[in-house]
Amino acid sequence: MYKDVLFAFGMFQATFLLLDIYILSKTGRDITRKGEHTWFCVLIVTHMVYLVCNTAWTMHEYDLLELPRALLMLVCSLSLWSVINCATSFFLFVTERREVEFFRTFTGRVLRLVPAGIATALILLNPWTGLVFTLDGEEYFVHEALYLPTIVVASLYLVAVAVIGAVAAMRARTSFKRRSSTALCGSVLLIMLYIVLDGFMSKASILPAAVFAVIVVIFILMQESSINSDALTGMNNRRKADEYLSERLTRISASDPLYLYIGDLNGFKKINDTYGHVEGDRALVRCSLALKQTIGRYNGFAARFGGDEFLMTRQPDGEAEADPEALIRDLTGLLAERSEDLPYELAMTVGYAVCRDPRVPMNDYIRQADAMLYERKARLRVGR
C-alpha cells in the first residue's frame, strides 16, 4: 500500500520540479524588474533543491534509498537551508515589488539579510556543533537546542511579508494592487497552514506543495502586472495611462478639473552617451522613484509614457490646492535629493494642461502639456 502512496508522492514531486523549470524558463526580465526577477528566480531554484532533498529523505525514511550517514546529514542540512532561503527570497521579492523605502537604503539591505545569514551559518556549522539537529543511532532526525530559533527566522520573514502585503492592500489606489497585495497575504496564510499540517507528517513533508503554490501565485501576478506595468521602473505603462485617462477624463468639469503633466528627463541622451545605457537605466529608475513619491503626496497617477517621458495627473479637491506648479516644485526637490551621489544632475522639464472639458479629446490635452514642456525646454535651453 505505502509503495503506491510513495509512487504518487514521487510523481507529484517530479511534476513540481518540471513546472519549476518551465516557470523559470518563462520568467524573463521583460515581465518584471531586475530585483524582483532575481529573487523570484532564487525562490524557484531553492524550491527545486528542496524538492530533491525532500524526495531523497522520504525515500530513505521508507527504506527505498540507502544513504550514507554523511550524505544524509547533507540532505537534512540542505533541506533546512532551503526552508530558510525560500522564506528569505519570498520576503526579498516582496520588498522589491512593493518598493519598501527602508529596504532600499544600505542599512535596510544589510539588515534584511542578517537573520538569514545567521541561520545559514548555524546550519553550515551544524555537522560539527550539532546545535540545530542530529541523527540518532537509527538515523532519525532529532531537533536540538537551536532548531526552533532557526525555524523562527523563516517564520519572521513570512510575518514580514504578511505585514507588508496588508499595509500595501490598505494603501492601494487600484484594484489590481489591492488584489495582488491580498494574494501575498493569502500565500503566507497558506504556508502557515501547511507548516501546521506538516507537523503531523512523520515521514514526509507537504511543505514543498505550499511553496510551489506561492511560486504560481507570484508568476500569475507578474504576468498580469506586465500587461500594464513598465518592466524597468515598475511604473504604469503607456497602455495603462491611456486606459486611465480615457476613464478619468469623462468625469472632469470646469469646477473639478484634472491637471495633466508631461515630464521629460533633461540631458538623457548625454547621460547615455557619456556613462552608457546601464547608467541611463539607473537614471530612469531613480527618476521614477521620485515621481512615485511626489505623486503619492497628491493622491494622483503616474506612468512612464515612453523613453524618458513620464505622465502624471492630479485632481485637486479644492481651489486652495489648485497651484499646478506645486507638484513640479516637489518633484524638482526630490530629483535633486536623488542626484547627490551621481556624477550628473537628475532634473526634469515638465509641462501641464488643465483639463476642464470632457468633450475635448485626450490627445489634445496631451499636446497642450507637450507644447508647454518644449516651450520651457527651449526657454531654459535644456537638451534631451
Image: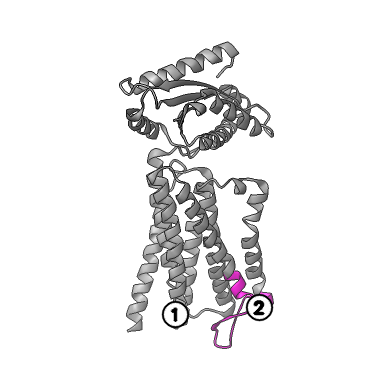
- What is the secondary structure assignment of the residue under circle 1? loop
Vertical side of 331 occupied by 180: above or below: below
Q: Residues within 10 Å of mark 1 (few under 14, many from 20)?
A: few
As drawn, the residue found furthest toward the left would be 359
Question: Callout 2: few (<14), some (14-19), or many (20+) C-alpha neighbours within 10 Å?
Answer: some
Identify whether 248 is placed above or below 148.
Answer: above
Q: Quadrant of residue 80?
A: bottom right
Q: Residue 164 or 234: which is nearer the viewer?
A: 164
Residue 127: x and y in percent read: 65, 75
- Quadrant of the image occupied by residue 230: top left
Judge by depth and name the residue closer to the eye, 12 or 117: 117
Q: In the image, what residue type sits under mark 1?
A: Phe
Per the rendered image, the range of residues in magenta is 127-151
Closer mark to the observer between disc 2 and disc 1: 1
Classify residue 356 as left or right of residue 286: left
- Report whether residue 110 is seen: yes
Q: Residue at (49%, 26%) from the top-left corner?
A: 322
Residue 286, given in percent of the width and then of the height, sits at 58, 35
Q: Find out whether residue 137 is within the magenta segment.
A: yes
Residue 362, placed above or below residue 304 = above
Whether residue 21 is visible, yes or no, is no
The furthest residue to the top: 379
Q: Where is residue 220 shown, x and y percent of the image?
A: 38, 51
Q: Quadrant of residue 81?
A: bottom right
Sequence-wise, the earlier of marks 2 and 1 is 2
Dot 2: what SS?
A: loop
Magenta span contains residue 27: no
- From the image, tell me which residue sits under label 1: 200
Q: Residue at x 49, y 70 (%)?
A: 53
Q: Work out which quarter of the rendered image holds the N terminus and state it.
A: bottom left
Q: Which mark is drawn over residue 130?
A: 2
Which amino acid type corresponds to the residue marked 2 in the rendered image?
A: Gly
